[in-house]
Image (cartoon, coloured by chain):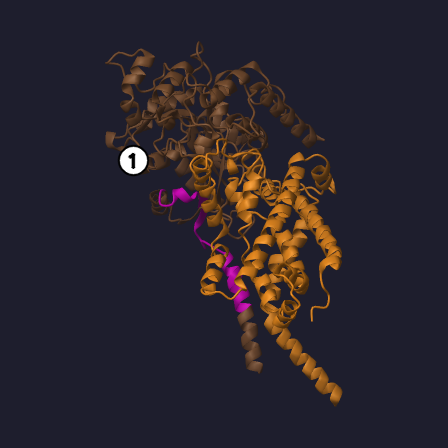
């Protein structure tokens, strides 16, 4: 009797589970799982977008990308440089802002809103605005530098040696969600710890290093993962800054842009782009694994 | 509870069904995907087709065709070009049988365009409009600098200061310098625009100088940019932007970011250009016209720039290939070409010049169409190589760009840059073949 009612209860729970997750599940299967599997299959073929038929090529696409395609490696290298430096910049800006916003000053809601604005504006629009600011000929930034008497003004996004750096500078303002994560974590730290530390005469820096940082380390780890993946798959900003073409001189050619160009620009090599996507996926997977290993050294397990 | 479950399941089902239904489009209409700027321009042609055949045409604008292929939204009529056809041909129905049945004569179209659209004897698309390299000029800016141009070109008061078919690169340069203005040491306008983000201008000079991108007989797999002709052409192209005051009449890469363009009325000429921009020039109220390209000094018979064509073919998956061909036939034929001429689309028919000349004056666009067709006669098609645009963008233009900046990352040795492009292009093809 009890077994039957347990079974009924399980069935009821399961029905609710399906009801509430059904829509998401259909979406996941159609728009994520199917493309993931199809991309894997395509990566072993010479399929182009406009071709009706295609041949199975084994690992040829993978071998070509890994051994012959110099632009593939250049785009990977640039993606890593971009992800690393913009990651650090975003981490610092989001942490500093979260610390500032967690302080009790008048008008804090206004500042919270202002700092969230770039996050709610489409990144294409943000990119276009920054492109104007960093215009090497008559942009605001160079006008300011000119006022200070700087002679050799930077070319910013127009220089092959400075375009990626410009993107990194701009991306450091993309703190939005990460700042909120830090803010929530900081606000979750009990005041008692700080009060005790203050009684013991700990400086602000000491309190940050010894209390705040260890207690928000799980969120720090979460943000590090988020920022790394965001940086590696960054597309919109590079698309705007490099006119969708890695301009100038392929210096803003991040991996997602190169993959997109390979698949959707002439000669439309979809199979090869799929192989590149999988290589990159494996690289990100490995990197995330390394980050999990490293997290042992800085993430506090017991924050209670 | 049961009712609630049924309701929820129905909702999920309905959502999924509507999602898929949303992918279906057009019903019985003939589907076509056009560029965003084409919105409204074809309505008259669609209406005319519907009136004469009873088949409706449903157009979408601004959608990337590469993302529609294989979907339920795939158009019946697909846009391609003489540049892209090699990479796209498998999605197109060969039109030979349709052409034969309809009595159409592909000989009515410009030969080089038709050759580009014919692969292994199969015609995959019909050309609807052409583009060729021209010298565009702003009449107002020329009028404002008429005195200086006359002085530098040695023209009398009665002679026109506008570019004409006798112009050489030297005349182009001299006039360009006369049209370049400064104020307080800063440039306020340039004689000519610089196109460094695509090959449109640079390759014109290379062709005109007698050079080519690929070596003849190499099946378009070996780069020929180490030739003296390519060097001469590229040096002219670079000096135009980076030379001293006796050579510079166009913006460098940084100045180009300052908005010195033909469109913004801060550059008096543009070499190469595109007929697709005519609409914008008119919309912005530019007082402009066209001339044939200036030729290298002592070589008035030099080859012209490039000729390319927008073309449309029928999807192999189309369920209405007959109706689609009827529409293509109308569009690429005389009637369609004349209807589209008012939107600055110039058909690829050999007799287009006569068709335009026969139009009432108010229906002619007022441009020097003799110059246009003279340029067409001298123009050459781009190499029939499916990786050409990729190689040109990713290897050639990305290296050439370094010649247009100063400071970090810049280059000054033109021959070294061309040699590097050749090495990289050759390696690209070797690797691809391997």
- Which residue matches tag 1? B285
Q: Is B315 situated above or below B207?
A: below
Q: How many marks?
A: 1
> In this view of the protein, can residue B101 be seen by the observer?
no
Percent from the top left, x then y, of residue B10?
A: 54, 72
Host chain of mark 1: B
Which quadrant would the C terminus of chain B be assigned to in this image?
top right
Percent from the top left, x then y, of residue A288?
A: 70, 54
Which quadrant would the N terminus of chain B be assigned to in this image?
bottom right
- Of B306 and A223, nearer the camera is A223
> In this view of the protein, can residue B257 be seen by the observer?
yes
Residue that lies at the very extreme toward the bottom in this rendered image:
A1
| 10 Å crowding of disc 1: few (<14), some (14-19), many (20+) | few
**Which region shows up in magenta?**
B13-41
Residue that lies at the very extreme toward the top in this rendered image:
B298
Q: Is B152 situated above or below A255?
A: above
Q: Is B406 situated above or below A5?
A: above
Percent from the top left, x then y, of residue B302?
A: 46, 15
Badge 1 element: loop
- Of A155 and B386, nearer the camera is A155
Q: Residue at x 65, y 44 (%)?
A: A80
Chain shown orange: that is: A
Residue B388 relative to residue A39: left or right: left
Image-quadrant location for residue A276: top right
Residue B25 highlighted magenta (yes or no)? yes
Q: Is B365 situated above or below A119?
A: above
- Of B94 and B143, nearer the camera is B143
Chain shown brown: that is: B
Residue B238 highlighted magenta (yes or no)? no
Percent from the top left, x then y, of residue A205?
A: 63, 59
């Amino acid at each position: 009797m009890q077994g039957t009612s347990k079974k009924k209860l399980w069935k009821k729970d399961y029905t609710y589970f399906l009801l509430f997750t059904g829509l998401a599940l259909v979406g996941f299967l159609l728009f994520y799982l199917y493309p993931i599997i199809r991309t894997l299959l395509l990566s072993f073929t010479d399929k182009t977008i406009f071709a009706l038929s295609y041949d199975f090529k084994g690992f040829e696409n993978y071998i070509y990308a890994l051994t012959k395609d110099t632009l593939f490696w250049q785009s990977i290298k640039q993606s890593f440089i971009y992800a690393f430096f913009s990651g650090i910049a975003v981490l610092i800006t989001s942490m500093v802002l979260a610390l500032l916003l967690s302080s009790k000053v008048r008008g804090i809601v206004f500042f919270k809103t202002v700092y969230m604005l770039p996050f709610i504006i489409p990144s294409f629009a943000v990119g276009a605005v920054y492109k104007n600011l960093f215009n090497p000929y008559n942009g605001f930034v160079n006008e300011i530098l000119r006022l200070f008497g700087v002679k050799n003004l930077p070319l910013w996004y127009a220089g092959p040696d400075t375009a990626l750096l410009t993107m990194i500078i701009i991306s450091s303002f993309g703190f939005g969600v990460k700042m909120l994560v830090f803010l929530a974590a900081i606000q979750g730290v009990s005041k008692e710890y700080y009060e005790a530390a203050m009684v013991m005469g700990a400086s602000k820096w000491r309190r940050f290093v010894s209390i705040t940082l260890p207690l928000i380390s799980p969120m720090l780890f979460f943000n590090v993962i988020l920022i790394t993946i965001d940086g590696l798959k960054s597309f919109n900003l590079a698309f705007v800054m490099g006119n969708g073409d890695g301009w100038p001189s392929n210096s803003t050619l991040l991996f997602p842009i190169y993959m997109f160009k390979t698949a959707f620009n002439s000669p439309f090599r979809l199979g090869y782009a799929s192989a590149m996507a999988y290589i990159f996926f494996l690289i990100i997977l490995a990197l995330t694994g390394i980050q999990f290993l490293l997290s042992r050294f800085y993430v506090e397990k017991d924050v209670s | 509870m049961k009712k609630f479950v049924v309701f929820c399941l129905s909702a999920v089902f309905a959502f999924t069904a509507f999602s898929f239904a949303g992918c279906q489009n057009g019903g019985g209409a003939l589907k076509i995907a056009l560029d965003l700027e084409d919105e409204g321009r074809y309505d008259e042609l669609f209406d005319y087709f519907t009136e004469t055949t009873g088949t409706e045409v449903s157009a979408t604008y601004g959608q990337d065709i590469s993302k529609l292929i294989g979907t339920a939204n795939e158009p019946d009529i697909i846009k391609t070009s003489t540049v892209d056809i090699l990479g796209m041909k498998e999605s197109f129905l060969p039109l030979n049988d349709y052409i034969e049945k309809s009595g159409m004569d592909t000989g009515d179209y410009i030969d080089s365009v038709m050759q580009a659209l014919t692969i292994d004897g199969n015609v995959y698309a019909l050309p609807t409009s052409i583009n060729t390299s021209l010298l565009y000029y702003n009449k107002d800016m020329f009028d404002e600098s008429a005195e200086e141009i006359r002085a530098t070109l040695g023209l009398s008061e009665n002679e026109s200061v506008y570019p004409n078919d006798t112009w050489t690169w030297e005349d182009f340069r001299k006039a360009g310098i006369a049209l370049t203005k400064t104020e307080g040491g800063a440039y306020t306008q340039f004689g000519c625009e610089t196109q460094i983000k695509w090959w449109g201008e640079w390759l014109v000079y290379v062709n005109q100088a007698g050079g080519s991108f690929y070596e003849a007989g190499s099946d378009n797999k070996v780069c020929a940019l180490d030739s003296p002709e390519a060097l001469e052409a590229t040096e002219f192209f670079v000096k135009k932007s980076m030379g001293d005051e006796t050579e510079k009449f166009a913006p460098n890469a940084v100045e180009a970011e300052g908005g010195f363009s033909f469109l913004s009325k801060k550059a008096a000429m543009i070499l190469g250009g595109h007929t697709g921009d005519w609409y914008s020039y008119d919309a912005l109220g530019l007082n402009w016209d066209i001339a044939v390209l200036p030729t290298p000094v002592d070589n008035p018979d030099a080859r012209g720039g490039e000729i390319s064509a927008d073309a449309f073919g029928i999807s192999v998956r189309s369920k209405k290939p007959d109706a689609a061909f009827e529409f293509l036939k109308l569009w690429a034929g005389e009637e369609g070409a004349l209807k589209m001429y008012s939107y600055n689309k110039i058909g690829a028919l050999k007799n287009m010049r006569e068709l335009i000349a026969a139009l009432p004056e108010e229906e002619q666009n007022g441009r020097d169409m003799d110059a246009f067709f003279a340029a067409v006669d001298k123009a050459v098609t781009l190499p029939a190589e499916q990786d050409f645009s990729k190689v040109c963008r990713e290897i050639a233009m990305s290296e050439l760009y370094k010649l247009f900046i100063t400071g970090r990352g810049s280059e000054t040795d033109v021959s070294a840059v061309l040699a590097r492009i050749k090495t990289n292009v050759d390696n690209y093809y070797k690797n691809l073949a391997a």
